[in-house]
Amino acid sequence: MIRRRVDDLLAFIEVARELSFTRAAAKLGVSPSALSHSMRGLEERLGLRLLTRSTRSVTLTTAGERLLQSIGPRLDEIDAELAALSELRDKPAGNIRITADEHGFDSALWPALRRLLPKYPDIKVEVAIENGFTDIVAERFDAGVRLGGTVAKDMIAMPIGPDLTMVVVAAPAYLAGKTPPRKPQDLTEHVCVNLRLSTRGGIYAWEFSKRGREFRVRVDGQFTVNGIGPMLTATLAGCGVGYLPLDLVQPHLDRGKLVQLLADWTPPFAGYHLYYPSRRQPTAAFTVLLETLRDHARRA
């Protein structure tokens, strides 16, 4: 009876966090109908409505919200303690979930994971590629990889890569017959390739700095993507001006396929950091990841 209650509570936490029976069922490895039946049984035993269901959405009642806030952190603590038991094994083991943007994964995270994974076969790593900041606590990630070191007070930020430079570039075919921009504001007269932030849905405003003066420019164009890979492809094809990491476009600059613009407006800034909750006790697997990332950053 106790085990059934715990299983139902764990299932409720997934539904409450996902606000979707379909997504929660996929995570739990059960059918949505079986999960819905479990939730109805839990509500009947408690004598309270926890979820409000409609054909398109699931929302929490006041009782459901209170149950989520009261038992969710406790179950997370139990899960973390069980994961920490892997430290008693000869080799670290466990699951690590990380959110990173596309370039952060390629340039800072993957080089370390490429060394870690063959060495520790019992460590499983899941990476979600997302452009924009993610609430790693709410989304149950162990860590996130993002540019710069500005994070919430209860987070630890560890540099895992060198300083970076974002640059404005365009293909010679696009620039033919056009006046190149001489200041960032001139970009409003050009067709640009936009980047949509996947976690918030907004269009990224290009950032510039010169002599202590910092500001952003919102550009316009025909083509919008949610990843820098497609942005580079479109820029190389002459679809417009792009705003991309220098290390990514340098080979194309060297071969003359791209031309850098506004070079004196894009100074270097703090590179990629790994950020994670300061209160969470790191598992043996996560500790190995931190050590591997530190070692790679020293060598970079």
Image (cartoon, rainbow, N blue to C red):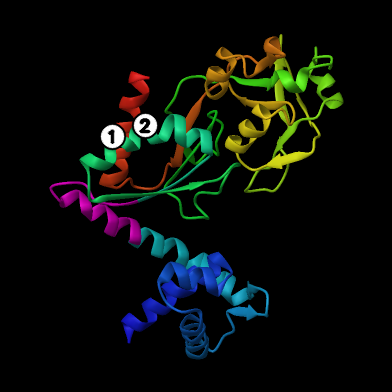
Cβ–Cβ under 8 Å for marks 2 and 1: yes
Disc 2 packing (10 Å; few <14; some 14–19; many ≥20) = some
Res 114 quadrant in image: top left
Residue that badge 2 annotates? 111
* Magenta residue check for 107: no
Q: Nearer the viewer, residue 272 or 7?
A: 272
Res 107 quadrant in image: top left
Q: Amino acid at mark 1?
A: Arg
* Magenta residue check for 81: yes
Q: Which residues are magenta?
A: 79-95
Circle 1 — which element? helix
**Picture coordinates of residue 9 (x, y %)?**
43, 75
What separation in Å lies between label 2 and label 1 (alpha carbons)? 7 Å
Q: Is residue 194 above or below residue 22?
A: above
**Picture coordinates of residue 60 (x, y %)?**
62, 73
Residue at 30% x, 26% y: name it: 295
Q: Is residue 201 left or right of residue 14?
A: right
Q: Amino acid at mark 2?
A: Pro
Q: Nearer the viewer, residue 173 or 203?
A: 173
Q: Is residue 57 left or right of residue 67?
A: right
- Position of the C terminus by quadrant: top left
**Picture coordinates of residue 147 (x, y %)?**
54, 30
Residue at 61% x, 38% y: name it: 230
**Picture coordinates of residue 161 (x, y %)?**
44, 25
Disc 1 packing (10 Å; few <14; some 14–19; many ≥20) = few
Residue at 72% x, 44% y: name it: 202
Q: Which mark is residue 115?
A: 1
Total numbered badges shown on the rendered structure: 2
